[in-house]
Amino acid sequence: MAVYENGNGSVFANDAKINLQRVPNLSDFFPDLPKYPNPLNENKYFHPSKGFFATETQFVAKSVTIDVSNPNPPNQKYFMLAGPREKVVFKSEDVKAAIVTCGGLCPGLNTVIRELVNGLWHQYGVRQISGVLAGYRGFYSSDTVYLDPKVVDSWHKVGGTMLDTSRGGMDLKKIVNSIEDRGYNVLFIIGGDGTLRGAHGIFEEIKRRGLKVSVACIPKTVDNDVAVIDRSFGFQTAVEAAQAAINAAHVEAESTPNGVGLVKLMGRSAGHIALHATLSSRDVDCVLIPEVPFFLKGPGGLLEFLDQRLAENGHCVIVVAEGAGQDLMPKSGDGAKDDSGNLLFQDIGYWLSGQLKKHRNENHPGKVFAVKYIDPTYMVRAVPSNATDTLYCTLLAHSACHGAMAGYTGFVAGPVNGTYCYVPLEQVAYNQHLVNVNHQKWAWVKSLTNQPEFVKPDSLP
Amino acid sequence: MAVYENGNGSVFANDAKINLQRVPNLSDFFPDLPKYPNPLNENKYFHPSKGFFATETQFVAKSVTIDVSNPNPPNQKYFMLAGPREKVVFKSEDVKAAIVTCGGLCPGLNTVIRELVNGLWHQYGVRQISGVLAGYRGFYSSDTVYLDPKVVDSWHKVGGTMLDTSRGGMDLKKIVNSIEDRGYNVLFIIGGDGTLRGAHGIFEEIKRRGLKVSVACIPKTVDNDVAVIDRSFGFQTAVEAAQAAINAAHVEAESTPNGVGLVKLMGRSAGHIALHATLSSRDVDCVLIPEVPFFLKGPGGLLEFLDQRLAENGHCVIVVAEGAGQDLMPKSGDGAKDDSGNLLFQDIGYWLSGQLKKHRNENHPGKVFAVKYIDPTYMVRAVPSNATDTLYCTLLAHSACHGAMAGYTGFVAGPVNGTYCYVPLEQVAYNQHLVNVNHQKWAWVKSLTNQPEFVKPDSLP
Amino acid sequence: MAVYENGNGSVFANDAKINLQRVPNLSDFFPDLPKYPNPLNENKYFHPSKGFFATETQFVAKSVTIDVSNPNPPNQKYFMLAGPREKVVFKSEDVKAAIVTCGGLCPGLNTVIRELVNGLWHQYGVRQISGVLAGYRGFYSSDTVYLDPKVVDSWHKVGGTMLDTSRGGMDLKKIVNSIEDRGYNVLFIIGGDGTLRGAHGIFEEIKRRGLKVSVACIPKTVDNDVAVIDRSFGFQTAVEAAQAAINAAHVEAESTPNGVGLVKLMGRSAGHIALHATLSSRDVDCVLIPEVPFFLKGPGGLLEFLDQRLAENGHCVIVVAEGAGQDLMPKSGDGAKDDSGNLLFQDIGYWLSGQLKKHRNENHPGKVFAVKYIDPTYMVRAVPSNATDTLYCTLLAHSACHGAMAGYTGFVAGPVNGTYCYVPLEQVAYNQHLVNVNHQKWAWVKSLTNQPEFVKPDSLP
Amino acid sequence: MAVYENGNGSVFANDAKINLQRVPNLSDFFPDLPKYPNPLNENKYFHPSKGFFATETQFVAKSVTIDVSNPNPPNQKYFMLAGPREKVVFKSEDVKAAIVTCGGLCPGLNTVIRELVNGLWHQYGVRQISGVLAGYRGFYSSDTVYLDPKVVDSWHKVGGTMLDTSRGGMDLKKIVNSIEDRGYNVLFIIGGDGTLRGAHGIFEEIKRRGLKVSVACIPKTVDNDVAVIDRSFGFQTAVEAAQAAINAAHVEAESTPNGVGLVKLMGRSAGHIALHATLSSRDVDCVLIPEVPFFLKGPGGLLEFLDQRLAENGHCVIVVAEGAGQDLMPKSGDGAKDDSGNLLFQDIGYWLSGQLKKHRNENHPGKVFAVKYIDPTYMVRAVPSNATDTLYCTLLAHSACHGAMAGYTGFVAGPVNGTYCYVPLEQVAYNQHLVNVNHQKWAWVKSLTNQPEFVKPDSLP
């Protein structure tokens, strides 16, 4: 079977069209780019043998299931296999690397930074590594910090980011000016979808200016709504950390007549944390996520469910994702945004807490009732990565190092079906991974919580 | 040295007056009350030997320090030594015990209940033990639950209270009617100062009606503001649990330019938790407690301190007790109270968070700034007791059992200088233990945080 | 592209041979087996829509990477997609299910049992579910326990197995007699490779006797050496739990001159836990696993490395898998086996600890030296599953339920590349997944620890 | 009441003899020693007011209980109240302080060091503080490390000791020579009873040589067998940490037929940790401590109890202190000692584990049986101090600073009945605090575990 590649990143094999998703390489823009043997060849711990280096012909399937009654799934895509390449496009001594973290905190941020430094230093002999402080604005508004393995040695045991982070500061021109002035040629950008869209702009501007600079990205979103790759780092840790809040809500609810424990968890557009935390806990009576609209009053609504559950069980635990129910709350009217450009949400937990109290006061006056509202956001996201995420962060970071040194640019490093890949940056920056409410997992949640469908009677056929 | 006791619970020895604080005994009211040998005499594990039983002549000094230049400290008090007595006033088969928990949650509540049950069952052969549900109202508004060692076996590993709790419901007449109707003769009441004042009323009413009922109390206040005894149960656990919130605040604050981490901790009248959590953490820049007034604006105020600290360190962690700064906030006007009769507080953390933002926006516009406000209250108080508190809860509960079986009534069980005592109920119910701001410990906190004195210039002499 | 299937579970597409790995179905042996609609059709939470049910034509690729220069990887295999089927082969009221756990403990065991019960009960309306006690011998030597969702409600929060487990007891005839006598028709067997080989025997004997019984297996090995599927349940929890031991070893080693912290971790044939725990910790100087032979004395040996590391750093942390270095220790001579038939290992940690002391005493007399040996095995494996594993255990259990109800038998449920599959039992029972020491991950470990290759000089070319 | 002091540290008040336990002061040996105002007078955080400074006439009672029928308890002792004194005997700039840690690890060691440094630096303006490395031998065999608040800032979050520790090295002459040569005048010695006896030798030698050097000691023994003071630092943390091991033992025991979980805990002479961990856990069937002899075979022995408990409950959890049952094991014959001079113990847990297996094999052949032996020693003692101990360590350290600066020497700082005192060094160095097996607490343990008395039939009267 011969493989033909077309200009759009697709190849044709026989009658099968294979959709290969290549990421750009500096050699695409600099045809005469010299290449050098990978320093890992000289590394006493690696002993590259046959098959050690990944090649440009190796790809990873996005969809692993086939239907033998229809063996050409229409939407199959293949991403480039991550890993060290036989040749690199930088001499170690010429590399000036910069690492920046943007947006909110996420467990494992410091681990990613640490392992970028270690990967560059120990595997590629890079000695000039700068930490850009406090997000994008740090490129132009402050000094950077020197990084080496000794400096970052204990960072994986600390939550947050030692490089500071902030929202906003995305002044494209100033940033690329600074990159040019300071001579960085390998950039590692760690941030959420807003950050990645910024990174895409930086990548385009760098290309426009004809700079020989690799732009490698690592998606960071504790919400886990990142597209294409399996999951975002820190997510497992966050789900674990959220258990303490649900446990407290459950204890509070059970310890008082008609007690309600209400926990708000992160998730602006996607309810992954709320969903997974609910599945791990088993103590939740109702989980509300942005993907599933709900309403309060009348048959089929949340208040009816609450009353039923209190009548049956005497207590009720509700988990609500921060982005759920935004349509229900009075608008703040001004469309205020945070410095990352995210619409500022009203606090659904606080609002819901008030609504539940109001309902009970009006409809069950004189009955003991209490809502205990817990917002564990910072306690969930400011912890260090657990063992699972620590390992994951390391593999992400090392994959990014291998890719950048090999000249790949405008890419995201991450696992697809458990295998590390390089994914075109725009595919991740401009897409989101929401909870699939048609999937069994959501059905299973409902069967576990026995929560209602939130279907208004008049919307039934 | 002869000892003479006067009618007010004091004795005179030579020229020294010894202030003995006796607690009432049922035999004070029923002069012919029959007494029985303590069942521990027949317990194969206890082998009472000489000195095993506590006597009515053993007391514990409240003050352990003496000044040999003035050996008669004016305020020395002596409390009755707790422990099993040689004689008890109940036959095991006649005891009908009831246990009730009131007010908010506190780590160790379930452990106390468990050990009351175990102490009664295993040490005194009591077989009729009822759990009163959901606080005082449970005496008259619901069935009770049967308790035995098997039922309570795993309770010490669970936060909250298996008996439910609630505020209010203190209908004296109905409660004592129910006690009389159901025939309880040994009551264990676990709750805060409001609850203890209620218990004092019950004790008086029981006395008035001439009922042969022991009323034993165990003070429960996670705030640790209980008078006379060394500390309240669950306090050590709460201080430990609060560390996670302070750590998160610290990480959040350090991970962003001009980051402020703000943590609200329990403490309506007394800042013990805030103070101890600060001392254990060492990551706090300022701790605000009810005992120390503060103000925001102008020289010596909190906002000035904030600006200085941010300028020096780039971040700031503030811990505020829930009862601090109540005078600063706009009044809600209605003097609303919760069902325990406590004045409802406005949320100082939420308010302060807004004030800090407002100040920075107005006075440092354009500068990155963020306040991360954490209210870990339920996550701190809904956990099970740690090892230290588990042991403590047990000794409290067993002390209470010994006292009640010996006929003591209207008393609180608890340690004074590490030795378990019986304290007259009204001394605990009508007093509070606040942070002594003249003590070295508070000076030490200030030296540790370097926080200001909050002295307004014009208030200086 | 047409697909043809041959008798050996393979199909041919054009010139490509697709290796489909079907698992047996009871309808293979009972051609006239009646089928019933899946009860999920009537379940209010599931609303099966198009694509909800998995079909017999859906398969999951074992290898997700392709090389477009050679698009037919020679060893590609496809496993049956797990999930609910449109038809089931049992009426709910006819199902008599039995669940058994065998071998050593593993985090998540109770969660798997809980979710088998919940899956059967809530999704398939099964009401006769028995827990077989204490492993295989429980089939014939003791009563079973009744299981329903209420009984198992809190089991996921408890380590170990509520059904008891034991090694051995694999008396094939007695077991199948009991299955026949008691009328079980759906079996869930949870255990390690020895257990799965036993399960294969049971499956074969059931087939031989012509019984209509589904045999569904869930591999349990905290060592994570299970073949085909992505990982075994409890593994992530164990790696996390092992961190406490490595931390303690590190603190002990650092707190004394020439201190050595030595930690033994599980791993009879495969060093996955040792490897992953090392990668998560970063505080380890040398990790010894069964897949990589090592030696003590002479150039390139462990003792030389130890001396160097102590001279450089003053301390050293070593992690050793229980199956490493077995060739170095004096034989116990008797080839003793445990009741599962596993060769009893000598304690490599204890032995190694002695060897290190002996070496230092002989070669560095008078120098301070200390080995602190930690064996955290039971503390690692007896904990409840963490959030990641709790979810994983649930998906495993529900997959197994769906498969068994659809009549599949002699199969293992588990994820392949993150997608849940049914795998022929013998492929898992008779294979093992070892650490691939040619993979970058092992190279990376070595670069992280800087440990030697353990190559004897004379074995060099 | 006049107070007369005699030469032996006793005073007479009327007919009452008050036993005052003064500690030496440098001014006792240097009558003309100049004194300086306490620098705290100038410290903006402390504002010493009336009553702030402790005086030489303030003492703390050892016994807090009185019997009013006999108001002169024969053994009452009074210790000097700790705290800052109005005058100090060193100018801040003249102080050369040295801190040394000896013996095994204990939670909180680093916290004590940190707070000695902070107390000296911030409260007394001391700027020359040296850390002596690796125990006593560090005085003469290695350089010291410079300490200041910045260096020690995060030490309280780390287990072990940053100064290293070791056993032995107690060469009195070399040590005092070094003290003299290096000019140290304030010594802080942190260690167990062996270390304190060494410290007493140093104190005597310093006195003999006429050196103006304060010797302040802080007892460190995770076993909690320290005399006079309330408890040793780290003990509460250790009891907490031991819970994980007991939980694992309990899960292992419950998960297999006739399962035994055996946990060895620290406690060479005193069973405090075993006792407290048992009381906190409630899952223990038998606790064996050095203070209570036991035997294995025959009526009333451990094996009989084991068989009974397994027959009744199906499992059994045993906690054994390391020093228990030493008389039962075959002697190693050589009376080997560790470098601290402690007799090397054989491992009672390992030995007992073998004895239990042997017994069951011989007397219950063919029955499933398993012992899971856990030795969590290093995992218990190498953790950082919990919140309770962190605070405690700080108060200990600050008390020691105040005492040393005031010229007290040859003393131990620690709480007596919750109030911090200075205790003559020899009272702590030459005494031990064992478990009082005649106390109710031990009776209570037995009633909780239902364990036997271990009384041989022929030893009955």
Image (cartoon, coloured by chain):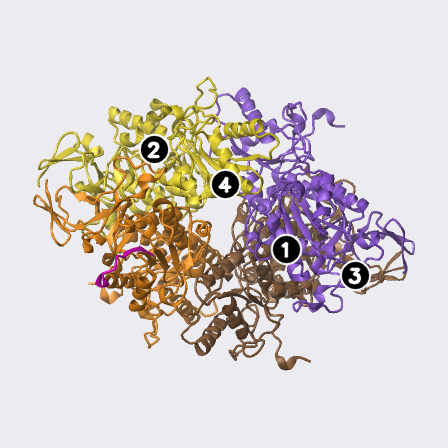
Chain colours: A orange, B brown, C yellow, D purple
Q: Are marks 2 and 1 in contact (CB under 8 Å)?
A: no
Residue B453 circle label: none
Is D146 situated left or right of A300 in this image?
right
Count residues near mark 1 (Cα–Cα under 10 Å), then give few for <14, some for 14-19, many for 20+.
Answer: many
Q: CA distance from mark 3 to mark 2?
A: 73 Å
Identify residue for label 2: C434
Chain for disc number 2: C
Amino acid, disc 4: Ala
**Residue C109 relative to residue B81: left or right:** left
Q: Secondary structure at mark 4?
A: helix
Q: Which mark is residue C245?
A: 4
Please name the residue that numbered disc 1 is placed on: D117
Q: Mark 2 belongs to which amino acid? A: Leu
Say whether mark 2 and mark 3 are on the same chain. no
Q: Nearer the viewer, mark 1 or mark 4?
A: 1
Vertically, is C334 above or below D66? above
Residue A212 belongs to the span the image colors magenta: yes
- Binning the other alpha carbons within 10 Å of mark 4 as few (below 14), some (14 to 19) or many (20 upward) gives many
Q: Nearer the viewer, mark 3 or mark 1?
A: 3
What is the CA distance from the residue labelled 4 to the residue labelled 2? 23 Å
Q: Nearer the viewer, residue A40 or B420?
A: A40
The extreme top residue here reads C333
Task: List x then y, in percent, for residue B183.
Answer: 63, 55
Side (left or right) of A250 relative to A42? right
Q: From where the camera sits, is residue A187 visible?
A: yes
- Measuring from the top left, give residue D47's x and y in whole percent: 69, 69
- Helix, strand or loop at label 3? It is loop
Which amino acid is tagged 3? Lys
Real-space Cα separation, disc 3 to disc 4, in angstroms: 51 Å
The residue under label 3 is D35
- Quarter residue D118 falls in: bottom right
Discs 1 and 4 lie in a common subunit = no
